[in-house]
Structure formats: C-alpha cells, structure tokens
Image (cartoon, rainbow, N blue to C red):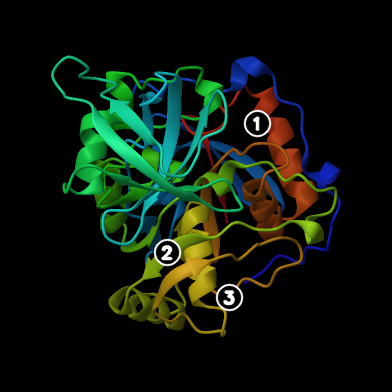
Amino acid sequence: MSADVPEIDELDTYSYELPEELIAKEPPEQRDGAKLLVLNRAEQTIEHRTIRDLPGLLKTGDRLVLNDTRVVPARIIGYRTATGGKWEGLFLRRGEGRDWHFISQTRGRLLSGESITLTSIHHPDGTPPLEVKLVDRDAHGVWQAQPESDDDAFELLQRYGTVPLPPYMHRKVAADSDWDRYQTTFAATPGSVAAPTAGLHFTPELLAACSERGVDQSRVTLHVGMGTFRPISVERLSDHDMHSEWCELGEASAQHLRQTKGNGGRIVSVGTTSVRTLETAARSGTIKPWSGETSLFIRPPYEFQAIDCLLTNFHLPQSTLLVLVCALAGTDFVKEAYRIAVEHRYRFFSYGDAMLIL
C-alpha cells in the first residue's frame, strides 16, 4: 500500500521549526504515558489521542511488527596508552573473531598498531583497565581493533561502556533510568547503538491489550547504526549515499505476515526500523525471510510492498527517517501534522510523543 506521493527531491522540503523546549531530554514518567497524534490518510484528518488508546485504534486481524534489537552500552572512554591523551569512542559492531569496529575521537592522529586503554565509565574503581589494539581504519573512519581479552564483546561493553544517548539529551553518561527506559521491554538481540524509539512506548500490559483486541505481533531485528541519525549532507535526496544496517526477518514471521495480508489484515509497523526491514524483505512483491545488510532508502515516491500503517516518533528535520514518513503519508500532510504537534506542545525525538499513520 502506498500513498500517492509525488517525488520531492529537494532536501530543504523536509525541514520544520522546532522550539528547543519541545525536545524530550528525559523519558515520560510512565512508559506508556505519551501523547499520540493520529493521521488518517484516507480521510486526511488529524486527531489527538494517547498511546494507551492504541488497541482501540487497531482492528481485529491487524498485526504489529516490533523490532527486538537490544541497545548495547556502546559509548566507551579511555586514553591513548602511549601518551595518556584522552580518547572516546562508539562501538558499532562485532567483527570476525575478537574484532571490534568503532569510531573514535582524540587529539592528534591515531595510528595503526597503537593501543587504547579503556576505563570503566560506571565502575572505574572496581574494574581494571582494558587495552585495545588498533588494527586498521577504513575510508569511513571506522577502526578495526582487538581487545586484550577473550571475553565476548557485549560482556566487555557491559563492564566498560554506557548507553549511547543522542547528543540533544545533553548528557554523555547515561543516568540509571536510561539503562531501563532507553531500551524496549521486548529487547532480545544485542547490537544497536540507538533504540528503536517507537517501541519504547510499549509495556507488557499495552501489548496484552493489543492481543486481547485480536491484534497479533511479530518480531523483526534491525540493529540501529549511527548512519540512521547522520544528517543528509547533499541538497538532493537522489544524491544521498544511504547507510546500511543489518536486519533479519525469520521464516515464521514472514509466513504470519503473509497470512495477515491474505486475510485482509493490516501490517502495522512499530517504528521506521521495522519498516526498513519489512520493505527490504518484500522487494520482490512478496514478504520473504531475509537476513543481511540493507541500504534501502525509502523516499517519495515509493511503492510500499509490506506495511500498511506506521507508529513512529517525531523525527529530526532533514533526516532519512522524516523522509520515510513523508513517503508513506505525503509530505504536505506530514508537515501539517508536525506543525500541529508543535502547536499542541508534543514532545519530540527519542523520549518524545508518537504519531500513528493509518
């Protein structure tokens, strides 16, 4: 299903004015306490509801698709072993064997063969330093490195790292509450450096209420990378080099999704990461199992093959995520919804309120 959305290639089109005070720097008091702006594409109407209203806004036979990725404590700090100069990095993914891949910043130029010494962010007195040897850096500035430990990368990150919060939250070290709230309640597969934020609104009780409504659920996995949040740096979308992310849709989930569509139900994607996974898996026109990297850039015009509806948070201006939402609902309609959201003091970005596109 696709909105009749014309191609709008100019990046400036995907901008809007956002007062600083509407950027959510802390989670709502209750996980399911967000407001919900409901966009009905067929009727071109916009309605104010809450996340707790979601089960009543869906229909028996619909299916929610949730991204079960788990955010890892990917922000790491330390010093250059030889000089003692400050260093900080962001773990991106595991490589072959013990290899790590990360981006980093420090004074001066890092060289292949030198070492970084990591210190524990949350337990500096009780955790001995960890030495990490730099092997090589690729053209995108990503380092391949090897820690002096045989322990699993994610176990080491639990000891040395912290939750990598977006810069607009203005705190480099995650608070205790962030370890819980910047993670979905259904997170299972570690690998993301950022949360699939539409999923943050769900409590077990809300998911149960959807099930009681006759709305089944399926899981996909997409490990959110830093590329998701990098601003588009070209003036035309057609010139943008889209980042890739690893995602997976299993055989059983693919079968359930095909059955839902065959029975006339709607596929309701929870978040843009689930959209990207499903649309990658359905590029042939049929939803099939998928596992691997996707560099799919969903922009107007785009013919959606898998999803029918979308639950999503409010996204940064000129971001690929906002472009995706416009491809589904229409650029003018989305911009009007964002204007209304600002007018009614909705909270924006990761810890903010949500939008449901029907």
Going from the N terminus, do you reach mark 1 or mark 2 first? 2
Report if residue 162 is visible in the image.
Answer: no
Looking at numbered disc 3 in the image, what kind of residue is underneath it?
A: Gln
Direction from residue 319 to residue 95 in the image, left or right: left
How many numbered circles does the render carry? 3
Report the residue that reaches farthest toward the left. Answer: 126
- Decide: few, some or many residues near mark 2? Use Cα within 10 Å; few <14, some 14-19, many ≥20: many
- The part of the image, by quadrant, that contains residue 67 is bottom left
The residue where tag 1 is placed is 341
At a point 42% along the width and 21% down the height, the residue shown is: 83
- Residue 358 image label: none
Q: Label 3 vs label 2: CA separation?
A: 17 Å
The residue where tag 2 is placed is 247
Direction from residue 225 to residue 82 in the image, left or right: left
Looking at numbered disc 1 in the image, what kind of residue is underneath it?
A: Ala
The residue where tag 3 is placed is 305
Viewer-side residue, 102 vs 294: 102
Q: Label 1 vs label 3: CA separation?
A: 29 Å
How far across and down, in percent of the image, does residue 179 sit? 29, 29
194 to 272, vertically: above or below: above
- State yes or no: discs 1 and 2 in contact (Cβ < 8 Å): no
